[in-house]
Amino acid sequence: MNAIEWVRCPVCGNKTRLQIRADTELKNFPLYCPKCRQESLIDAKDLQVTVIKRFETKTQS
């Protein structure tokens, strides 16, 4: 059976809305965190997530 884990936000460390399995591969995936409202570009392979770039999101005023 494949292991399933939640992807955690690289900024605040909370769970995001995304789960990955051990055989999942992501390249240049835009990960959004609903709690801190930050977006990061990630790669994932073998349940290891690496951050490529963090984006600053602008708040509406």
Image: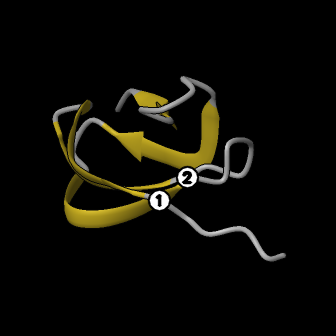
Residue tagged 2: 38
Residue 43 position, x and y percent, is 19, 50
Marks 2 and 1: in contact by CB < 8 Å?
yes
Amino acid at the residue labelled 1: Glu
Q: Which residue lies furthest to the right in this view?
A: 61
Q: What SS does tag 2 mark? A: loop
Query: Residue at horizontal 36%, vertical 41%?
Result: 21
Vertical comparison of 54 with 11: above or below: below
Vertical comparison of 22 with 54: above or below: above
Residue tagged 1: 56
Crowding at dot 1, Cα within 10 Å, few <14 / some 14-19 / many 20+, comes out as few
Amino acid at the residue labelled 2: Gln
Query: Residue at horizontal 61%, vertical 49%?
Result: 33
Q: What SS does tag 1 mark? A: loop
Q: How many labels does the image show?
A: 2
Dividing the picture into quarters, in which one does residue 40 lie? bottom left
Query: Which residue is at the front of the view, 11 or 8?
Result: 11
Residue 60 position, x and y percent, is 79, 76
User: Is residue 18 left or right of 50 when viewed as pictured?
Assistant: right
Q: In which quarter of the image is the N terminus?
A: top left
Q: Quadrant of the C terminus?
A: bottom right
Residue 45 position, x and y percent, is 15, 42
User: Is residue 28 left or right of 41 when viewed as pictured?
Assistant: left
Vertical comparison of 18 with 27: above or below: above
Query: Disc 1 versus disc 2: distance between alpha carbons?
Result: 6 Å
Query: Residue at horizontal 56%, vertical 65%?
Result: 57
